[in-house]
Image: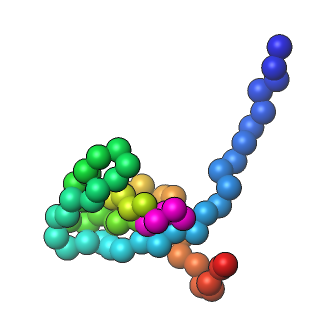
Amino acid sequence: MNKKKKYRRIPAIIEAEGPITKERIIPTLEGNQKASVGDYIITDIHGQQYPCKPSIFHRTYEPIEKEYI
């Protein structure tokens, strides 16, 4: 029997734009997604963009002060 282990997500640096002031349609790998006013547009480490609700964005991400490579 396999033992369960706990894992934590590896931190990733993303870029974000927002909160946006106009609705936008964002093409994603899962299809087009609507970004509503107030949402953030996240660009991940692979260059893919997707919308993120402000409540989730602020619980998940924090600003960084210096550039990472």
Rendered view: 41 above or below 34: below
Residue placed at 41% from the left, 65% from the top? 42
Please name the predominant secondary structure of the magenta segment in the image: loop
Residue placed at 74% from the left, 37% from the top? 6
**Viewer can see residue 54:** no
| Residue 49 lies in quadrant | bottom left
**Viewer can see residue 27:** yes
Name the side, left or right, on which 61 lies relative to 40. right
Residue 35 at what x, y percent from top left?
24, 59
Residue placed at 38% from the left, 49% from the top? 29
Q: Could you say which is closer to the camera, residue 59 or residue 44?
A: 44
Residue placed at 62% from the left, 84% from the top? 67
Residue 55 at what x, y percent from top left?
38, 57
The magenta stretch is: 43-47
Q: Residue furthest top?
A: 1
Q: How many marks?
A: 0
Q: Residue furthest left?
A: 22
Location of the C terminus by quadrant is: bottom right
| Residue 5 lies in quadrant | top right
| Residue 36 lies in quadrant | bottom left
Residue 20 at what x, y percent from top left?
25, 72
Residue 26 at what x, y percent from top left?
27, 59
Location of the N terminus by quadrant is: top right
